[in-house]
Amino acid sequence: MAILITGGAGYIGSHMAHELADRGEQTIVIDDFSSGLKWAIPSGVPVFLGDIGDQRRVAPLIAKYGISDIIHFAASAVVAESVADPLRYYRNNTVNSRNLIEVAIRSGVQRFILSSTAAVYGNPPENPVTEETPVAPVSPYGSSKLMAETMLRDAARAHGLRYVILRYFNVAGADPALRTGQTTRGATHLIKVAAETAVGLREKMQVFGTDYPTPDRTCIRDYIHVSDLVNAHCHALSYLRGGGESLTLNCGYGRGFSVLQVIDAMRHESGNDFPVELAARRPGDPAEIVASAERMRRLLGWRPQWDDLSLIVRHALAWERKLLAQGNARLPPENFSQSRSVRLSAR
């Protein structure tokens, strides 16, 4: 059995590649390197340049390696950007996912794990959010992911593909061994931005919205350590391999922290009282969203190991300091020639 990771050079995908390599799984990565970095992928893992929506490139890869499982991370994932450029999100997250699901079914792939998002819930009427909470996305990002979920469910029902859909809450932190972490240029994720500000890569950071109906008037989110998240994927894979039926599950800790609480934690860990500027709300941001992950714990046997905001912040900060020391903090995407063959030519 071999596993194909789409977007395996990105933030979460590269952590997944390291985790599966650690477990001795045969793993293959495909990425278009629009944001991922080649050096984030563990040594010895075959990696291919390609668009996951291009079936003529993906199908031979599945056939050559005998892919039995796909873990699909490749996507665009910035809420504000999706509001400004919705068609890009519907292409990358919806159309490309549709093509990938189709080629997976035609090629005999048995199991499919889809990276989804809490953004499908929009502004939930109550917290914590369960998998039965009505979906009502308020951004094209959330809508594009919900469409991918729907297509996977319908296609799986028609063709016997078994799947797990994992709805992430706010993913943060870095590999505790600092082999990989978040390298997104111009990142908008709060903990990444706070870490960049703490090490001096930004003069200041902004808090978007201070008039929300929350205790300190800033947004509240459920932050899950990226290592716990990839461990949830491993549990999902084991569950499907054991014959488990298709599932949709929330991925979070069930506890929320406000923007100001996160900033305070970063200031404490870094020892830097960096400047913060208050700004207007961003479109598409819900006031509060916190997961109920009891279903995942019960059905998959998943137990988090890094459920501590200070640890999440500490690992994110350590990763940022490593990037800064290596001069890699603002590397552009790797310069893969468009003429380079992605037929089946691994690095």
Image (cartoon, rainbow, N blue to C red):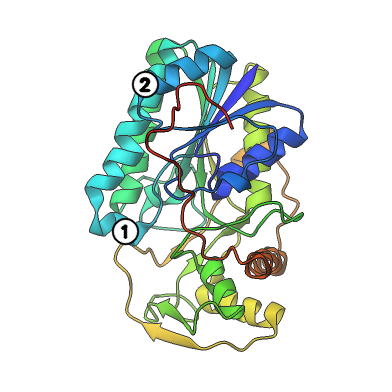
Is residue 323 something one can see in this rendering? yes
Q: Quadrant of the N terminus?
A: top right
- On the picture, is 90 further left or further right than 118? left
* Residue appearing at x 60%, y 25% in the figure: 3
Dividing the picture into quadrants, the one containing residue 269 is bottom right
Name the disc covering residue 81, or none: 1
- Residue type, numbered disc 1: Glu
Q: Position of residue 27 (x, y in %)?
A: 64, 28
- Rendered view: 212 above or below 291: below
Callout 1: SS: helix
Mark 2, residues whose alpha carbon is within 10 Å: few (<14), some, or many (≥20)? some
Dividing the picture into quadrants, the one containing residue 224 is bottom right
* Residue appearing at x 40%, y 75% in the figure: 213
Q: Position of residue 117 (x, y in %)?
A: 45, 47
Q: Position of residue 8 (x, y in %)?
A: 55, 39
Callout 2: SS: helix
The residue closer to the viewer here, 129 or 38, is 38
- Rendered view: 299 above or below 124: above
Badge 2 vs badge 1, beta-carbon distance below 8 Å? no
- On the picture, is 189 further left or further right than 287? right
* Residue appearing at x 77%, y 54% in the figure: 177
What is the C-alpha distance between the residues marked 2 and 1? 27 Å
The residue closer to the viewer here, 332 or 161, is 332
Is residue 136 something one can see in this rendering? no
Task: Say which label, 2 or 1, has the lower sequence index.
Answer: 2
- Rendered view: 58 above or below 316: above
* Residue appearing at x 33%, y 74% in the figure: 281
Q: Position of residue 197 (x, y in %)?
A: 55, 78
Name the disc covering residue 55, or none: 2
Q: Quadrant of the C terminus?
A: top right
Mark whose residue sits in front, 2 or 1: 2
- Residue type, numbered disc 2: Gln
